[in-house]
């Protein structure tokens, strides 16, 4: 590796991205002095930083190592990644149509089917974000996903909230459930004892656990400037609380502390999984 050539490349790419040395350093969890040393040719990025650095600057690791952009970079690979992105967008466009049909037209409502559809599309999104170095394209895809997932979640909440209100609000005062953890433990025990089928646990525990997991990855791509972990979790908690308050105000469900606990636990779990696999 020619440190001076690599330094000049990092400098020019950082300027193209309109990033300061401090901003680039924060994204890599290092000091701005380290970035300054690279750009002056007095040092080189550690091998563990090459992948995240290449993703931020939108170049290959090999280009960083040789210190210049490869103008003959594989066009076929870029085209393939763009096609994957388009396929994901098309799936997202079909998702709300499928959801509306499933909720309001069909008589055989299968919640596990719709969860499988959402889970498959979300997995495709994760793979796309992992393999695609184009940050701008990834942000556009995520924005589309946010719009349609939020719309679909609103439809699901509105529909199930009405059913839930009719069935259970007679037992819950003012549509508020503030007893933490006890209902969750009771649901698990009933399934273990065989008094309820696993579907019961799936509908009232697992779905709430997974419901806001996608938002754990939306935030880093929607917020251009890196936010700290505390603000990150506070923002997600605010989104979850907003959903519960909306149910209460529209009288289409229950403000349930256990929903908040499960939603937030799912967000925390997904955050650390994404960190472990360097998705963002």
Image (cartoon, grey):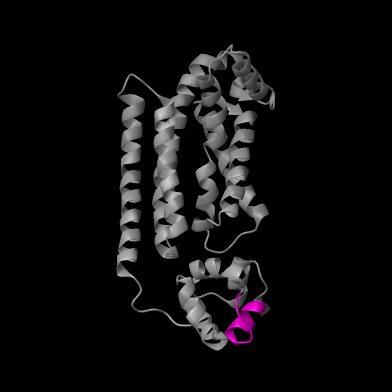
Q: Is residue 106 magenta?
A: no
- Residue 249 in percent (x, y) is at 53, 31
Residue 188 position by quadrant: top right
Residue pictured at 33% horizontal, 70% vertical = 74
From this view, report whether residue 53 is shown above or below residue 199: below
Residue most extreme to the top: 195
Residue pictured at 62% horizontal, 40% vertical = 264
Q: Magenta segment, which residues?
A: 34-45
In this rendering, the count of numbered labels is: 0
From this view, report whether residue 195 is shown above or below residue 112: above
- Residue 138 in percent (x, y) is at 42, 59
Q: Quarter holding the C terminus?
A: bottom right
Judged left or right of residue 230, residue 47 is left
Judged left or right of residue 230, residue 274 is left
Foreground of the two, 98 or 161: 98
User: Do we see residue 15 in this rendering?
Assistant: no
Residue pictured at 53% horizontal, 16% vertical = 197
- Residue 193 in percent (x, y) is at 63, 14
Judged left or right of residue 1, residue 139 is left
Residue pictured at 45% horizontal, 64% vertical = 135
- Residue 70 in percent (x, y) is at 39, 78
Residue 83 position by quadrant: bottom left
Q: Is residue 40 magenta?
A: yes
User: Do we see residue 109 in this rendering?
Assistant: yes
Q: Quarter holding the N terminus?
A: bottom right
């Amino acid at each position: 590796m020619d440190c001076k050539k690599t330094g000049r490349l990092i400098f020019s790419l950082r300027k193209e991205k309109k990033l300061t040395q401090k901003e680039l350093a924060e994204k890599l969890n290092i000091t701005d002095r380290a970035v300054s040393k690279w750009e002056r040719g007095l040092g080189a990025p550690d091998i563990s930083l090459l992948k995240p650095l290449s993703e931020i600057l939108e170049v290959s690791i090999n280009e960083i190592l040789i210190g210049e952009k490869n103008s003959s970079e594989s066009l076929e690979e870029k085209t393939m990644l763009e096609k994957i992105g388009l396929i994901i967008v098309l799936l997202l466009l079909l998702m709300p149509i499928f959801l509306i049909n499933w909720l309001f037209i069909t008589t055989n409502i299968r919640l596990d089917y719709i969860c499988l559809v959402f889970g498959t599309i979300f997995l495709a999104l994760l793979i796309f974000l992992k393999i695609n170095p184009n940050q701008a394209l990834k942000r556009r895809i995520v924005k589309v996903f946010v719009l349609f997932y939020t719309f679909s979640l609103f439809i699901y909440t509105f529909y199930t909230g009405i059913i839930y209100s009719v069935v259970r609000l007679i037992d819950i005062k003012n549509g508020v459930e503030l007893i933490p953890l006890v209902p969750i433990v009771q649901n698990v025990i009933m399934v273990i004892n065989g008094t309820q089928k696993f579907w019961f646990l799936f509908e009232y525990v697992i779905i709430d656990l997974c419901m806001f997991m996608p938002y754990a990855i939306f935030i880093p791509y929607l917020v251009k400037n890196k936010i700290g972990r505390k603000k990150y979790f506070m923002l997600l908690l605010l989104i979850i609380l907003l959903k519960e308050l909306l149910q209460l105000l529209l009288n289409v469900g229950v403000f349930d502390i256990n929903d908040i606990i499960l939603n937030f636990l799912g967000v925390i779990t997904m955050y650390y999984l994404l960190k472990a696999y360097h998705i963002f």
